[in-house]
């Protein structure tokens, strides 16, 4: 019975996230957030979507709070169960908050520590950072390399954040009884 309940809940979460994705594609994060706020809290997929909506609304500090709660264990340790999408969403929010060092630290964690290479969102963030760095003069680039904690206003050229969908569980087999 519990498996059946989980499958139903998973289908409901997936349907809700698909609706949220449509609203975000229509550039309507406010309505998407309202829809999510009517759903029960505590689901990591829905909470990730809340963070994405908040980023797209420009509420970066609120998004950081959501992503930090989902992705971190303690003050400095990234939760090993956090998905690559959650980590890149957190990194995006940090970059939008002008925290380049934090953003690059999470990207390093993802690429070097976890071995996740060529993740699309990480590639987009790295490309934005590289374009920013390329526009700097010599002394600014030197400062950039030495002081990541300095406030850097790196522009992103894509809608911030990615939704994640729960994995689809296989449909239970139908057993026909003869008799």
Image: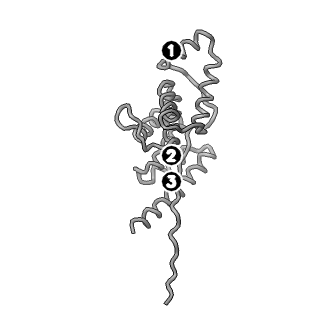
Mark 1 crowdedness (10 Å alpha carbons): few <14, some 14-19, many ≥20: few
In-image side of 22 versus 3 (left or right): right
Give whichever of 83, 54 is nearer the camera. Answer: 83
Task: List the single residue furthest toward the top.
Answer: 139
Q: Secondary structure at mark 1?
A: helix
Q: Quote the CA–CA distance across marks 3 and 2.
A: 12 Å
- x%, y% of residue 14? 52, 56
Pair 3/2: label in front = 3
Mark 2 crowdedness (10 Å alpha carbons): few <14, some 14-19, many ≥20: many
Screen quadrant of the N terminus: bottom left
CB atoms of marks 3 and 2 within 8 Å: no
Q: Which residue is mark 1?
A: 146
Give whichever of 134, 34 is nearer the camera. Answer: 134
First in sequence, mark 3 or 2: give its number: 2
Q: Which residue is mark 2?
A: 49
CB atoms of marks 1 and 2 within 8 Å: no
Q: Which residue is mark 3?
A: 166
Pair 1/3: label in front = 1
Q: Secondary structure at mark 3?
A: loop
Q: Quote the CA–CA distance across marks 1 and 3.
A: 40 Å
Q: Identify the residue at image location x=52%, y=64%.
A: 170
Q: Identify the residue at image location x=54%, y=16%.
A: 144
Q: Secondary structure at mark 2?
A: helix
Position above or below: 151 against 79 = above
Task: List the single residue furthest toward the bottom.
Answer: 179
């Amino acid at each position: 019975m519990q498996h059946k309940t989980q499958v139903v809940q998973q289908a409901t979460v997936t349907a809700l996230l698909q609706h949220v994705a449509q609203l975000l594609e229509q550039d309507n994060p406010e309505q998407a957030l309202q829809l999510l706020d009517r759903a029960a809290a505590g689901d990591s997929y829905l909470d990730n979507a809340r963070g994405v909506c908040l980023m797209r609304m420009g509420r970066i500090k609120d998004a950081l709070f959501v992503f930090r709660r989902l992705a971190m264990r303690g003050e400095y340790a990234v939760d090993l169960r956090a998905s690559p999408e959650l980590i890149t969403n957190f990194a995006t929010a940090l970059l939008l908050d002008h925290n380049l060092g934090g953003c690059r630290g999470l990207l390093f964690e993802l690429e070097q520590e976890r071995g996740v290479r060529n993740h699309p969102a990480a590639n987009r963030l790295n490309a934005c950072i590289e374009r920013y760095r390329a526009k700097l003069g010599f002394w600014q680039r030197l400062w950039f390399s030495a002081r990541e904690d300095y406030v850097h206003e790196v522009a992103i050229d894509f809608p911030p954040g990615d939704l994640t969908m729960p994995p689809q569980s296989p449909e239970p087999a139908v057993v026909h009884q003869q008799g």
